[in-house]
């Protein structure tokens, strides 16, 4: 009775010794499969008058892997290292690489290991991954990180040894700040008035209407990502200037091709952008800041009364309440001062928490307490306001 299976092309000898009535099988394997399975294991076994010998061969096809290693390792390594994720970015990366191999390779190895009673050794996938990772690290200088890599690479190999490579990069989280030096430049893209995608494209391709347009176009080019989201931390009128340290905002960039971006963009006399990478656990800190503003106020009804200003401007200092979506919000104003321009207009400087609606604070058309119009008993309107300074509320928060 013979339990050894027919090994097809791998068998170069199948002779029966007439004297001893023995069947002999010689099985050819490559250097990789030999190293993995038979480095410390004997290469001959006899079962029920059948002798099986393992022979390492560099010319014939390997019985276990069908020369998978020779046929694919260096081709895949070359494709990965010459991909857009590596050739245009010299920044050192942390990567993880996994593979999906055809099932028949595992079955063939398991059958042979069962025959030779080989246990507890790495399988073909372990060795393949280790060699591929080693070659890519050697070529790119990257390191392996299974938990939090910058790039996850998955290689899918089919039964004909055709392969497909999928890349997934870690999201990039940026703290941005902008200074605005030109009036008339809005902050956000307004999709409310655009009816369809075609019109959106036509409107946006005409020119840079907003700061958001400029940020997105810049980061699409810098990172190669197709999905970028901006989380604003407050806004100002399009006719306002933003000076000092600049207003902060958060950007999440999904699957960036490049992480080592140019951190500063200057558009002369118009806009300045600064970026730095941050961690998710720190994100809430950057929404906590004060702003120092200078606002131009017009008295709509009656004329300006200096006595009213002297007596009541200081009453703005302290806690302030207003409503957003039927929810009462509490913020604080820390200081206030004024400068009279003429009998209808004056400037007012305020240091206050981010998020207080300035035009509402002045005009009081919607609920807010206190309100300047109510304090001086004259109907006022905010013509525009500039942000002179932004002060983040935690240590080292002012530095990008």
Image (spheres, rainbow, N blue to C red):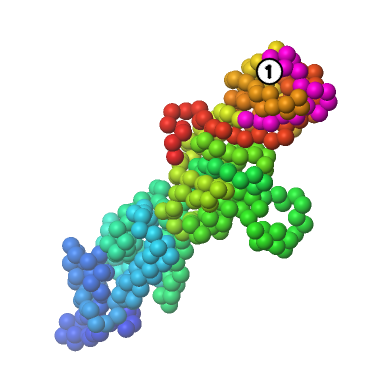
Q: Tell me where residue 380 appears, x and y as whole percent.
A: 77, 27
Q: Residue 243 is drawn in which quadrant?
A: top right
For image coordinates 22% across by 66% down, the residue present is: 35
Nearer the observer, 167 or 356: 356
- Element on which disc 1 rests: helix
Where 50 falls versus 337 (above or below)?
below
Residue 74 is left or right of residue 150, and the answer is left
Quadrant where the image shows the C terminus: top left
Q: Tell me where residue 59 appears, x and y as whole percent.
A: 24, 82
Question: Which residue corresponds to mark 1?
Answer: 313
Residue 231 is left or right of residue 162, and the answer is right
Nearer the observer, 138 or 49: 138
Q: Can the viewer see residue 384?
A: yes
Where 173 falls versus 288 (above or below)?
below
Q: Residue 208 is drawn in which quadrant?
A: bottom right
Nearer the observer, 221 or 225: 221
| Magenta-colored span | 294-310
User: How crowded is the residue under tag 1: few (<14 C-alpha within 10 Å), some, or many (20+)?
Assistant: some
Q: Tell me where residue 308 appears, x and y as whole percent.
A: 74, 15
- The reply to whether the magenta stretch includes residue 311 is no
Residue placed furthest toward the left: 19
For image coordinates 57% across by 33% down, the residue present is: 388
Nearer the observer, 299 or 359: 299
For image coordinates 70% across by 62% down, the residue present is: 202
Number of numbered markers: 1
Where 395 falls versus 138 (above or below)?
above
Quadrant where the image shows the N terminus: bottom left
For image coordinates 44% across by 57% down, the residue present is: 258
């Amino acid at each position: 009775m013979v339990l050894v299976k027919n090994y097809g092309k791998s068998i170069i000898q199948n002779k029966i010794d007439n004297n001893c009535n023995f069947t002999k099988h010689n099985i050819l394997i490559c250097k990789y499969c030999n190293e993995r399975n038979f480095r410390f294991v004997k290469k001959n076994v006899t079962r029920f008058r059948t002798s099986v010998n393992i022979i390492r061969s560099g010319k014939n096809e390997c019985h276990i892997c069908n020369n998978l290693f020779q046929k694919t390792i260096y081709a895949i390594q070359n494709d990965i290292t010459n991909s857009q994720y590596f050739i245009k970015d010299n920044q050192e990366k942390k990567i993880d690489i996994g593979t999906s191999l055809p099932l028949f390779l595992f079955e063939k190895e398991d059958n042979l290991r069962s025959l030779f009673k080989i246990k507890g050794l790495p399988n073909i996938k372990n060795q393949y991954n280790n060699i591929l990772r080693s070659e890519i690290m050697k070529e790119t200088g990257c390191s392996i990180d299974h938990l939090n890599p910058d790039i996850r690479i998955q290689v899918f190999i089919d039964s004909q040894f055709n392969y497909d490579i999928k890349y997934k990069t870690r999201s990039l989280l940026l703290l941005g700040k902008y200074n605005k030096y030109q009036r008339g430049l809005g902050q956000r893209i307004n999709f409310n008035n655009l009816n369809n995608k075609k019109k959106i494209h036509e409107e946006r391709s005409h020119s840079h209407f907003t700061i958001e347009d400029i940020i997105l176009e810049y980061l699409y080019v810098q990172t190669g990502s197709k999905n970028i989201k901006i989380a604003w931390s407050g806004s100002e009128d399009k006719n306002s200037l933003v000076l000092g340290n600049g207003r902060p905002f958060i950007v999440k960039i999904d699957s960036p091709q490049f992480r080592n971006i140019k951190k500063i963009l200057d558009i002369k006399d118009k806009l300045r952008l600064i970026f730095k990478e941050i961690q998710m656990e720190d994100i809430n800190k950057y929404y906590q800041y004060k702003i120092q503003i200078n606002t131009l106020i017009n008295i709509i009804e009656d004329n300006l009364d200096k006595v009213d200003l002297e007596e009541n401007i200081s009453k703005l200092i302290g806690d302030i309440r207003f409503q957003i979506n039927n929810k009462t919000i509490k913020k604080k104003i820390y200081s206030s001062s004024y400068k009279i321009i003429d009998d209808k207009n004056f400037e007012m400087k305020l240091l206050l928490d981010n998020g207080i609606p300035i035009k509402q604070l002045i005009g009081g058309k919607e609920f807010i307490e206190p309100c300047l119009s109510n304090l001086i008993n004259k109907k006022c309107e905010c013509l525009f306001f500039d942000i002179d300074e932004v002060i983040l509320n935690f240590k080292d928060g002012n530095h990008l």
